[in-house]
């Protein structure tokens, strides 16, 4: 399955919407998107995972790597709206306590989208 990544930035924050499956084959694409995004130096990144059907350990490692880089830059990386299968992976691995996980995309990103 194809992985689609789209990013919207607003006032030093970025919303990264991911669609599809994050696995061994698609993770490099996501990694390169994060590398490009983090060069811009946003202070806050929220990953909208509402359209992610599947995420394996390779995908989780990409997210962890991005989180580490954000923290090194003094920023934050958060996960929003994970589907039940992805939320379960976060819980089973204990990553739900590593990432800030939102049930929905934070309101301020929805407001920025409309402007």
Image (cartoon, grey):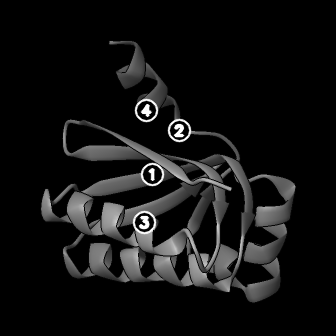
* Residue 106's disc number: 2
Which type of secondary structure does the marked residue at label 4 adopt?
Answer: helix
Residue for point 68% across, 74% down: 96
Looking at the rendered structure, the secondary structure element under dot 3 is helix
Question: In the rendered image of this protein, does residue 61 appear above or below residue 52?
Answer: below
Pointer 3 residue: 29
Q: Where on the picture, by quarter, is residue 8?
A: top left
Kindly check if marks 2 and 1 are in contact, taking CB atoms under 8 A apart as contact.
Answer: yes
Which mark is nearer the camera, 2 or 3? 3
Determine whether the residue tagged by mark 1 lies in a helix, strand or loop. strand
The residue labelled by disc 1 is: 46
Callout 3 crowding tier (Cα within 10 Å): few <14, some 14–19, many ≥20? some
The relative height of residue 32 versus residue 19 in the rendered view (above or below) is below
**Mark 2 or 1, nearer chain start:** 1
Q: CA distance from mark 2 to mark 1?
A: 8 Å
Disc 1 vs disc 3: Cβ atoms closer than 8 Å? no
Residues tagged 1 and 4 counted as in contact (Cβ below 8 A): yes
Q: Secondary structure at mark 2?
A: loop
Which residue is label 4 attached to? 109
| Residue 31 on image: x %, y % | 39, 72
Mark 4 and mark 3: Cα distance apart in space = 24 Å
Q: Which of labels 1 and 3 is toward the front?
A: 3
């Amino acid at each position: 399955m194809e992985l689609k990544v789209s990013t919207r930035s607003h006032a030093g924050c970025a919303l990264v919407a991911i669609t599809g499956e994050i696995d061994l084959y698609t993770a490099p694409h996501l990694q390169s998107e994060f590398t490009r995004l983090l060069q811009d130096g946003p202070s806050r990144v929220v990953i909208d995972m509402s359209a992610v059907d599947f995420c394996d350990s390779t995908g989780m490692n990409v997210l962890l790597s991005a989180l580490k880089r954000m923290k090194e830059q003094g920023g934050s990386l958060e996960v929003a709206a994970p589907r039940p299968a992805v939320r379960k992976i976060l819980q089973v691995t204990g990553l739900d306590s590593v990432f800030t996980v939102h049930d929905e995309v934070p309101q301020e990103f929805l407001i920025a989208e409309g402007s």
